[in-house]
Image (cartoon, rainbow, N blue to C red):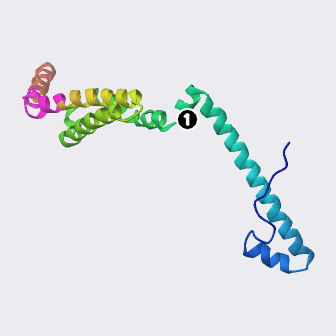
Amino acid sequence: MKPLRVPFRIGQIGDCNSTCKESSSPSASLLSSVHLLSLIALFKMAAAIKAINAKIRSNKVLDYVCSTHFWGPASNFGIPIAAVMDTQKDPEIISGNMTGTLVLYSAIFMRYALAVTPKNYLLFGCHAVNFSAQLVQGYRYMNYWHWGGREAKLGAAAKEGQKAAEAAA
């Protein structure tokens, strides 16, 4: 194992060490040794982290998994998953403004995913799913609030209530 080279002398580390060096008490000497040992441990830890990083970066799959090109879209996939799950809910709770905003957001980031170097296909896929789910939500919103879907639902509920009343009588 190579000896650790320290780029400074004791006493140059900082005010505490220079103060400790000037003092002749045994506790000051011990404190200086503790600082030196903690710095040596810090350098060894930095060297270990550098070695681990080099090993990760040498493997293409691990390099990709440890990058923002993977973790950004992976954490962003919560949005399209929620959007797909929301397609099963009542269209009365859909926000038209938010749906339109998310359609634009996903369209912009689909373009961005292909504009960066290297192309980020995972980000593109994430936003393509979200774009599609939000378009479905947008259609459901328009159908319910503007194209007669709400009236049809209320009419069906009224007929069902009338049949229930007749059956009870």
Q: Give the range drawn in magenta.
A: 139-152
Chief SS of the magenta region: helix
**Looking at the image, which is closer to me, 151 or 116?**
116
13, above or below 62, in the image: below
Looking at the image, residue 24 sits to the left or right of residue 75; the answer is: right
The residue depicted at 46 percent of the width and 34 percent of the height is 69
Does 150 appear in magenta? yes
The residue depicted at 11 percent of the width and 34 percent of the height is 145
| Residue 5: % across, % down | 80, 54
| Residue 14: % across, % down | 73, 72
Q: Quadrant of the N terminus?
A: top right
**Looking at the image, which is closer to me, 146 or 67?**
67
Q: In which quarter of the image is the C terminus?
A: top left
User: Neighbour class for label 1 at 10 Å: few (<14), some, many (≥20)?
Assistant: some
Question: Amino acid type of disc 1?
Answer: Cys
Furthest-bottom residue in view?
23
The residue depicted at 81 percent of the width and 62 percent of the height is 36
**Looking at the image, which is closer to me, 15 or 164?**
15
The residue depicted at 84 percent of the width and 45 percent of the height is 2
Residue highlighted by disc 1:
66
Q: In which quarter of the image is residue 100?
A: top left
**Looking at the image, which is closer to me, 60 or 94?**
60
68, above or below 34, in the image: above
Q: Quadrant of residue 141?
A: top left
Residue at disc 1, secondary structure = loop
Q: Quadrant of residue 165?
A: top left
Does 11 appear in magenta? no
